[in-house]
C-alpha cells in the first residue's frame, strides 16, 4: 500500500472516530437496580407543587460568601438559587453564573429533608416543615473563615429539628447537618435524603450547550457507588422510566453540565439508596437516602451530608469524597487527558497564560515523538525509492493479487522497509489530539481563558476563523514538502484538497486545540527540513524529487 494511501485511510478513520466521539460522548451506563428494604421510603412525589415559585422574600434567606451567593427557602430549608461569584455567565459579562435557580421557565434545585415513619417531610403530600431563622441575611465577614446558617423547626410532638448550613471561605462544599432533639415520650425513626431536580429540556435562552457540534458536552445526572466509581445517567434515560435504583455503603449523586456540577454526598453511616425519578414531562431528579436511624425518647442524633455546588476543579473536589473528581469527564482517553492537563497546569503556574502553555506542551510532546517522526519520514523516503520496483511488479503480475502481495512483502523484507512505518506516528498523534480535545472542553480552568489579541476564550472556537485558516496553510506547506507516491488521479485530488477539508473541519473546534495543531504543524515543517537534509546526505532523498 502506498504511503499516501495509508495516510488517507488513517485520515478517514481519524475523522470518522472524532465525529463518532463528538456525537456519542453522552453515552450513559445501563440502569442498575437492586431490591430495597421496606425501611427505606421513597420521598419522591409525582404531584409536584412548585411553591418556591410563589414564595415572597419573607420566606427566603440569602447567604453570601466570597465565592457563593445562595437563596434558601424556609419551606423545607431547600437551596433554590446559587450564583457563583467567581465565574461570569458569559465572556465579558459582569453577572455571575447562576448555577441553581427557580424561575417560571427553568428549575434547578438542591433539596434535602428528613423522611421515614416520623420524619417532618412528607413529599408525597407536599408537606414540608417551615423553618425559622433569627435573620434573613447571612454574610461571611472578612475576618471569618466559616459561616453557619441554623434553621429551626419544632414539631407538634415536641421534637426540635435544627438544620444547619456550614459554608467556608473559598470553598464550594457546603456541609448540611440535621440535629434531632427528641423531647417526646416515644422513639422516632427517621432517614435523611438529598435530591437534585432539574428541568430536563433547557429553554432556548438558557441552553448551556453550544450549538457547535464539536463543543457539545454531557448534561445530565451521574452517581458513584460501591459497584461503580463513576457512571453517567442522562435525562432521556430517566424520562423513559429506566430508573437507577442502587443500594451502596458509599457513594454520591450529581447533576452535571459543562464545567460545573452539583453533588450530594451522604455522610451518615450505613447504607444509602441512590435512585432517579421522572417527576413530570419536563422534570427529573436524582436522589440519595440513608438508612433510617432510631432516635430514642429524650436523646439527640445528628445526620450529615455535604453539598458541592460549583466548578469542577479536580484538586478541590478530590478532597470532598472519593471519585468526585471523575465528574470532570475526559472520556475513555482520560489516561492521556489527565496527565496532559497536569502538565499544562504545571507549566501555566510559571507562564500564567494558557495559550503559551499550550504552545510549550506542544513542543514537549513533539520533542518526545521526534524519533517516531524521523522513522516515519525515513520509511516514506525508502518507500519512494522502491516505487519503480513496485510498479514493475504491477505490470508483471497484473491481476494476480495474491502473487503481487507475496512479492511485495518479500521486497519489503529484503530492503528492510516497514510498510506501516509511515503510519505509526499518525496513530500515536490521534489519541494525543483527542485527549487534548477532551481536556480543553472539560477543564473549567480553561473556560474564558484568553491567549492574545482576538482569542479571548481558548475553550471556544475562533470567532474570526483566523487560526483554522493558519492551520490549513501549515498543512498545505507540509503537503508540498512531503513526497507523494500516489498515481491514482482521485487519490491525488483528495490529497490536494485535504488541507481545505481539515480547515473546514477545524472551524468548529476550540481555538486552543487549533493552536496546538498549528504549532504541531510548524514543528513538523522544521523536523521535515532537518530529517530530509540528513536523508539527502545519505542519498535517500534527492532534493529535486522533494515535491513530486
Image: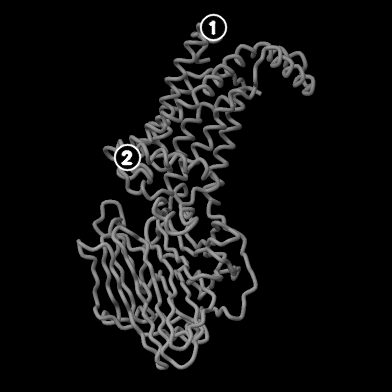
User: Cβ–Cβ below 8 Å for labels 2 and 1?
Assistant: no
Q: Is residue 271 above or below residue 217?
A: below
Residue 349 marker: 2
Residue named by callout 1:
538
Q: CA distance from mark 2 to mark 1?
A: 44 Å
Q: Who is closer to the viewer here, 221 or 161?
A: 161
Which residue is found at the position 46% from the left and 72% from the top?
194
Which residue is found at the position 61% from the left and 81% from the top?
38
Question: Which quadrant holds the N terminus?
Answer: top right
Is 427 displayed left or right of 452 in the figure? right
Quarter residue 142 falls in? bottom left
Identity of the residue furthest to the front in this view:
298
Quarter residue 227 falls in? bottom right
Q: Who is closer to the viewer here, 195 or 402?
A: 195
Q: Position of residue 114 (x, y in %)?
A: 46, 80
| SS for dot 2 | helix
User: Is residue 229 in view?
Assistant: yes
Q: Who is closer to the viewer here, 2 or 441?
A: 441
Amino acid at each position: 500500500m502506498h504511503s499516501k494511501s495509508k495516510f488517507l485511510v488513517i485520515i478517514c478513520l481519524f475523522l470518522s472516530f472524532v465525529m463518532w466521539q463528538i456525537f456519542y460522548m453522552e453515552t450513559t451506563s445501563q440502569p442498575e437496580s437492586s431490591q430495597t428494604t421496606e425501611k427505606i421510603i421513597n420521598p419522591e412525589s409525582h404531584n409536584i407543587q412548585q411553591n418556591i415559585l410563589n414564595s415572597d422574600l419573607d420566606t427566603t434567606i440569602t447567604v453570601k460568601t466570597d465565592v457563593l451567593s445562595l437563596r434558601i427557602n424556609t419551606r423545607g430549608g431547600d437551596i433554590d438559587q446559587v450564583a457563583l461569584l467567581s465565574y461570569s455567565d458569559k465572556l465579558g459579562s459582569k453577572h455571575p453564573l447562576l448555577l441553581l435557580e427557580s424561575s417560571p421557565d427553568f428549575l434547578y434545585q438542591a433539596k434535602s429533608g428528613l423522611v421515614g415513619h416520623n420524619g417532618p417531610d412528607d413529599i408525597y403530600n407536599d408537606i414540608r416543615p417551615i423553618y425559622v431563622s433569627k435573620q434573613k441575611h447571612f454574610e461571611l465577614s472578612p475576618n471569618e473563615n466559616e459561616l453557619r446558617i441554623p434553621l429551626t423547626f419544632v414539631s407538634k410532638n415536641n421534637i426540635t429539628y435544627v438544620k444547619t448550613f456550614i459554608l467556608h471561605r473559598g470553598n464550594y462544599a457546603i456541609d448540611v447537618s440535621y440535629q434531632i432533639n427528641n423531647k417526646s415520650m416515644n422513639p422516632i425513626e427517621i432517614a435523611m435524603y438529598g435530591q437534585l431536580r432539574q428541568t430536563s429540556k433547557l429553554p432556548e435562552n438558557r441552553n448551556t450547550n453550544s450549538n457547535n457540534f464539536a463543543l457539545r458536552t454531557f448534561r445530565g445526572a451521574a452517581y458513584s457507588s460501591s459497584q461503580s466509581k463513576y457512571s453517567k445517567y442522562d435525562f432521556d434515560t430517566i424520562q423513559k422510566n429506566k430508573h437507577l435504583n442502587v443500594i451502596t455503603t458509599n457513594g454520591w449523586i450529581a447533576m452535571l453540565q459543562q464545567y460545573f456540577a452539583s453533588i450530594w454526598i451522604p455522610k451518615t453511616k450505613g447504607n444509602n439508596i441512590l435512585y432517579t425519578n421522572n417527576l413530570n414531562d419536563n422534570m427529573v431528579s436524582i436522589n440519595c437516602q440513608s438508612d433510617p436511624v432510631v432516635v430514642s425518647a429524650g436523646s439527640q442524633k445528628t445526620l450529615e451530608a455535604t453539598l458541592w455546588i460549583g466548578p469542577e476543579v479536580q484538586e478541590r473536589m478530590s478532597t470532598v469524597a472519593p471519585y468526585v473528581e471523575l465528574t470532570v469527564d475526559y472520556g475513555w482517553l482520560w489516561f492521556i487527558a489527565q496527565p496532559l492537563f497536569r502538565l499544562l497546569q504545571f507549566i501555566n503556574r510559571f507562564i500564567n497564560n494558557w495559550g503559551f502553555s499550550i504552545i510549550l506542551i506542544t513542543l514537549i510532546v513533539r520533542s518526545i515523538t521526534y524519533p517516531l517522526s524521523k522513522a516515519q519520514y525515513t520509511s516514506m523516503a525508502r518507500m519512494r525509492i522502491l516505487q519503480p520496483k513496485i510498479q514493475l511488479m504491477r505490470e508483471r503480475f497484473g491481476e494476480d493479487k495474491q502473487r503481487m502481495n507475496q512479492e511485495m512483502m518479500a521486497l519489503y523484507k529484503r530492503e528492510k522497509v516497514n510498510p506501516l512505518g509511515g503510519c505509526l506516528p499518525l496513530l500515536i498523534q490521534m489519541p494525543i489530539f483527542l485527549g487534548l480535545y477532551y481536556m480543553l472542553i472539560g477543564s473549567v480552568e480553561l473556560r474564558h481563558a484568553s491567549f492574545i489579541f482576538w482569542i479571548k476564550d481558548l475553550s471556544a472556537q475562533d470567532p474570526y476563523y483566523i487560526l483554522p485558516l493558519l492551520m490549513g496553510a501549515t498543512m498545505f506547506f507540509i503537503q508540498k514538502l512531503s513526497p507523494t507516491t500516489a498515481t491514482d488521479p482521485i487519490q491525488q485530488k483528495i490529497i490536494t484538497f485535504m488541507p481545505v477539508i481539515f480547515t473546514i473541519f477545524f472551524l468548529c473546534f476550540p481555538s486552543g486545540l487549533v493552536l496546538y495543531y498549528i504549532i504541531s504543524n510548524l514543528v513538523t515543517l522544521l523536523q521535515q527540513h532537518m530529517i530530509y537534509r540528513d536523508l539527502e546526505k545519505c542519498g535517500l532523498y534527492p532534493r529535486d524529487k522533494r515535491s513530486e
